[in-house]
Image (spheres, helix red, strand yellow):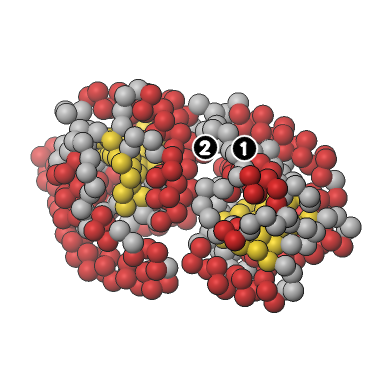
């Protein structure tokens, strides 16, 4: 009976590998289509095909898919380096690469290979990592199975599975479970996430709860550039971060609501995807407001009703620290939400919409902190931001209280680094 179970497990694994090879052409087509929409994704083709920059063998392979995961990964990289563990870090997006190149310390930075066995094998052959550590939810079947064939432990740090992903994975559990069983360890964000990993096939003894790395992402002080300090000194600042189509319009309406209440406020818009800058500029220009790009700011100072577009990376957290109020995007648009904790970690009160499928736990924490407000729609955002502006002193005090509240929840980076250290110690160099 046991041998039959092993045969079935091998069969399912073989099916997963076969399907991943079968889908390789579709991966290439999907990537080309994505590049047409976002040309910056075409950067680093050699690295995506597995041509890794020069790295020393025997290190740890860290991975954070995009800018949000990369920011969360930074605190973990620093904790691991303090323990003598370093290697290289990969990401999928240009914004994630920029974060890592700026903050990854001694770790080499590259684009992640396509999830095709040959591309992954090229990286593994070159780097011979002692472990692969992925932040949050990057469940690439070819990477996991190929890493295991090389004897490389696969670890998921600050692991999470959203409501939407859990339903989708359960639907195809017969394919997902054989991959999940090859994962050597999961340090989940929460008990709910831990239970979801177990339900999808990760053996219970390999799953632990270690907390959310995003709580530690603000542990390094954010410093505003001198020209931004000057630009934001004369008026209250409202930051709309990680916005998607439709959310810039909602932020503009919220700015108008502040003006109707007699509040002097300037708006900073930080789009999630910089490829959208031309369309955003067209929409903002139609509003008749003075609009500046951050990269072309010079010595100008923002005045009441002005709009600044953040077309750089790495400055959003510092702007949250200087802001009086914030809105986090992906929550009015049908996206599922972005990092709701980032402004609160900087002491800034935050409003967000109802589409919080991927950040549900963070939304609960935001509400419990006393400085996070969920709104139903764009009209609700107008009311919330206008209230923030009209009673700025009270809301900033709430933001500072939230900052202290979140500070007590830090420490996951140190816990996860120790957990990785234990697994790396067990791995064969």
Residue for badge 1: 345
Depth check: give the residue in front, 99 or 412. 99
- Does residue 273 show up? yes
Percent position of residue 23, x then y: 23, 65
Residue pictured at 48% horizontal, 36% vertical: 213
Q: Quarter of the image for the N terminus: give it.
A: top left
Q: Is 199 left, or right, of 306 in this rendering? A: left
Residue at disc 2, secondary structure: loop
Q: Gap in Å between the C-alphas at discs 1 and 2?
A: 8 Å
Against 201, residue 17 (above or below) is: below
Location of residue 6 (image quadrant): top left
- Disc 1 residue crowd, few under 14, some 14–19, many 20+, Cα 10 Å: many
* Viewer-proximal residue among 21 and 255: 255
Q: Residue at x 80, y 64 (%)?
A: 256
Q: Quick check: 393 left or right of 240?
A: right
Q: Does residue 251 show up?
A: no
């Amino acid at each position: 009976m046991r041998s039959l179970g092993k045969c079935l497990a091998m069969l399912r694994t073989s099916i997963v590998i076969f399907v991943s090879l079968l889908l390789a052409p579709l991966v290439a087509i999907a990537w080309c289509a994505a590049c047409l929409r976002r040309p910056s994704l075409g950067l680093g083709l050699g690295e995506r095909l597995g041509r890794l920059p020069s790295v020393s063998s025997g290190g740890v392979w860290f991975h954070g898919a995009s800018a949000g995961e990369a920011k969360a990964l930074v605190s973990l990289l620093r904790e691991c380096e303090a323990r003598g563990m370093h290697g290289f870090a990969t990401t999928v997006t240009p914004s994630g690469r920029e974060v890592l190149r700026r903050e990854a310390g001694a770790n080499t930075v590259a684009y992640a290979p396509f999830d095709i066995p040959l591309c992954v094998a090229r990286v593994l052959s070159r780097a011979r990592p002692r472990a692969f550590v992925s932040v949050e939810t990057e469940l690439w079947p070819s990477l996991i199975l190929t890493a295991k064939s090389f004897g490389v432990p696969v670890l998921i740090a600050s692991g999470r599975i959203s409501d939407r992903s859990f339903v989708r994975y359960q639907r195809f559990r017969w394919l997902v479970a054989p991959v999940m069983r090859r994962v050597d360890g999961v340090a989940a964000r929460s008990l709910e996430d831990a239970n979801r990993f177990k339900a999808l096939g990760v053996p219970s003894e390999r799953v632990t709860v270690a907390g959310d790395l995003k709580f530690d992402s603000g542990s390094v002080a954010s410093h505003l550039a001198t020209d931004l300090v000057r630009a934001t000194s004369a008026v209250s600042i409202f930051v709309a971060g990680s916005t998607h189509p439709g959310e810039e319009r909602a932020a503009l309406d919220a700015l108008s609501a502040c003006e109707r209440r007699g509040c002097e406020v300037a708006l900073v818009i930080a789009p999630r995807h910089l490829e959208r800058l031309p369309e955003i500029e067209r929409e903002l220009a139609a509003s008749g407001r003075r609009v500046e790009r951050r990269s072309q700011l010079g010595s100008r100072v923002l005045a009441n009703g002005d709009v600044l577009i953040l077309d750089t990376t790495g400055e959003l957290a510092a702007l949250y620290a200087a802001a009086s109020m914030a809105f986090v995007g992906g929550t009015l648009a049908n996206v599922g939400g972005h990092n709701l904790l980032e402004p609160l970690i900087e002491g800034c009160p935050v409003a967000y919409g109802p589409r919080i499928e991927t950040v549900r736990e963070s939304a609960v924490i935001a509400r419990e902190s006393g400085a996070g407000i969920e709104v139903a729609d764009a009209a609700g955002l107008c009311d919330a931001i206008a209230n923030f502006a009209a009673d700025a002193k009270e809301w900033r005090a709430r933001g500072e209280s939230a900052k202290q509240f979140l500070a007590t929840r830090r420490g996951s980076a140190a816990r996860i680094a120790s957990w990785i250290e234990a697994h790396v110690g067990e791995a064969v160099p």
